[in-house]
Amino acid sequence: MTRFMNTQKPTSKVNALGLAYKAGALITGEKRVLSQLSTVKMLILASDAAPNITQKVLKKVQFYHIPLIHTWNKLILSQSIPGTPVLIGVTQASFISLLKKEASDGQKTNTSVQRS
């Protein structure tokens, strides 16, 4: 008999983010990510982030031409990496295609903006 009410198994999205985290390819936290935009290859923003953070990040994405994934909520993101991340920066290009592929089933993915 199990005592846990919510026994959701991790999805491949969670596994890919966890793998990127273990590889040291992620920066978490709004201030850290925004201060290191020169090294960020892609941003992941929680779909349930506050409107002011969402607006700020969308402006930065358009200005710096950084791809954005805006599909997963805080619960899904927190299942893959420690804490409750709202904004995540991906610093290694090798993880971008994997994360885009896994986010492609979402409706709020902006992968058309490419960084030169």
Image: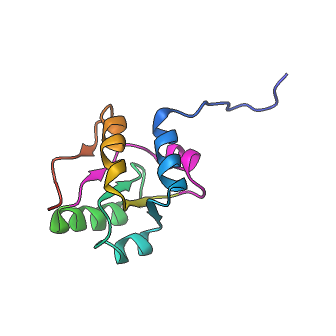
Magenta highlight range: 66-84
* 92 vs 38, nearest the viewer: 92
Q: Residue furthest bottom?
A: 35
Going by the image, does 58 lie left or right of 3?
left
Residue at (35% x, 60% y) in the render: 51
Q: How many marks?
A: 0
Q: Quadrant of the C terminus?
A: bottom left
* 39 vs 84, nearest the viewer: 39
Residue at (29% x, 60% y) in the render: 41
Residue 4, visible in the rendered structure: yes
Q: Position of residue 70 (x, y in %)?
A: 33, 48
Q: Quadrant of the N terminus?
A: top right
Going by the image, does 40 lie left or right of 10?
left
Q: Position of residue 113 (x, y in %)?
A: 16, 53
| Image height of 55 relative to 44, above or below | below
Residue at (37% x, 55% y) in the render: 45
Instruction: Name the image colouring.
Output: rainbow
Quarter occupied by residue 38:
bottom left
| Image height of 35 relative to 92, above or below | below
* 32 vs 96, nearest the viewer: 96
Q: Position of residue 46 (x, y in %)?
A: 41, 52
Quarter occupied by residue 36:
bottom left
Q: Position of residue 72 (x, y in %)?
A: 42, 43
Residue at (23% x, 60% y) in the render: 66
Q: Residue furthest right?
A: 1
Going by the image, does 80 lie left or right of 47?
right
Residue 50, visible in the rendered structure: no
Q: Is residue 76 magenta?
A: yes
Q: Is residue 46 magenta?
A: no
